[in-house]
Amino acid sequence: MSDVQNDTVPSIPPSFSAAKNARQKARASGMDPDRWYAVEYDSAIKKGQVKEVTFWNLSIAVYRGEDGELAAVQNRCPHRHLKLTHGAVEKCQLRCAYHGWSFDRNGWLTDYSHDSFGKSLIKHQLRTYPLQVRYGLIWLFPGDPGKADEQKVPEIPELIGDKPWAGFTVDYTWKTHHSMVIDNICDFAHAFLHRKYQPFVDAKLTHYESDHNRVYLTYDTYMAEGKISRFFVNRKRVNTRSIEICYEYPYQWSNTGDSIKHWCFLLPIDEKTTRVFFVFYFDSVKIPLLAMNAPKWLTQLVLDASVPLLFKPLLAEDGIALEAEQLGYDTHWDAAPIELNPVVPLLQKLTAQQWQSYLDRAQAAPIRVTRQ
């Protein structure tokens, strides 16, 4: 006798504390703010510009002063609570659009342009956030600033030094929970979704292990089997029959033959929205019909041409599936989980454990930000 599922009027998915299984826990989890997160391209904020970035419903104003230095402050003027991103950058300060209150990089109120009332300058300081730039991306630390030095932005030695690899970065903002993105990019059972481009075919899980910080796995699979991509991979030099994948919380990476690699950096905007940065890099590509590898400049040209033709539409397929999965989960969150890949529950467990760890720390020692 087969199981029959009856669709009913959807109810609200449970909160983290009320969740009953690993999937529900993961889907109700935020991400630990005591980590570095890629929030924007360095090139996206010019001198004198300000832009809003959001981490888990927390709005932050990131701006670049006329001296070229970046700063990040809470995106709320304490006067009438307008977002400071509605305002303007003047030299190295950020001025509110409403009454002209101006704040410096340290968050201090330095000027308000209606001092004719005869009152001395109000002492007030906005919360600020540590920033750094790596790999062409702006990284922000939204949690306890005292922990910023303890955590590190992932090291990608292939993208620094005298001979960096060719590569590119693409990003998407998807209407989906961040844990669904991790499930998707670590689960190679969804090759049917990509049957047009065939980035991987016939994947078989060969190994997996997990601890409190990461989930590591390997697949035997045929990589880069697409009609075009197959001609640019030197299979005599690069092992494209297997791939390493790791969810190294809160980041994800993969490695194919020590020649084709990527990192995935997630920015959880809210409970159902995630911005995803994919950083791909290659040591070289093969020149079609020739038994030789392309030099870096030609490899970069090939990659640049392939981004709109291959990588973007391929990854867009994941976005379509993930947004549909989010809608499905919202309606059927209480359906019994059916999961054949043993790695997926481990990914969800790690996400929930890390969120619980943060909640425990926050309850024991809440962040204290000076206000005057």
Image (cartoon, helix red, strand yellow):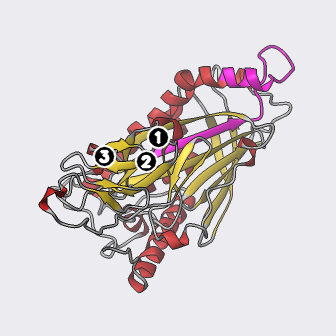
Residue, disc 2: 92
Quadrant where the C terminus is found in the figure: bottom left
Picture coordinates of residue 369 (x, y %)?
Answer: 38, 74
Q: Magenta stretch containing residue 71, yes or no?
A: no
**Sequence-first tag of 3 and 2:** 3
Residue interval drawn in magenta: 276-302
Q: Nearer the viewer, residue 3 or 353?
A: 353
Q: Secondary structure at mark 2?
A: loop
Label 1 or label 3, whichever lies nearer to me, is: 1
- Name the residue rendered at 52%, 23% in the picture: 308
Q: Amino acid at mark 3?
A: Thr
Mark number, residue 66: 1
Q: Amino acid at mark 2?
A: Cys
Q: Secondary structure at mark 1?
A: loop
Residue, disc 3: 85
In the displayed structure, does residue 244 sit left or right of residue 314?
Answer: right
Asked where in the image residue 342 lies, by quadrant, the reply is bottom right
Q: Nearer the viewer, residue 105 or 324?
A: 105
Q: Is residue 18 above or below residue 277?
A: below
Question: CB under 8 Å between callouts 1 and 3?
Answer: no
In the displayed structure, does residue 354 sit left or right of residue 299?
Answer: left
Q: Secondary structure at mark 3?
A: helix
**Sequence-first tag of 1 and 3:** 1
- The residue furthest bottom is 364
Picture coordinates of residue 171 (x, y %)?
Answer: 48, 38
Label 3 or label 2, whichever lies nearer to me, is: 2
Give the Cα separation between the discs numbered 3 and 2.
Answer: 14 Å
In the displayed structure, does residue 200 sit left or right of residue 108?
Answer: right
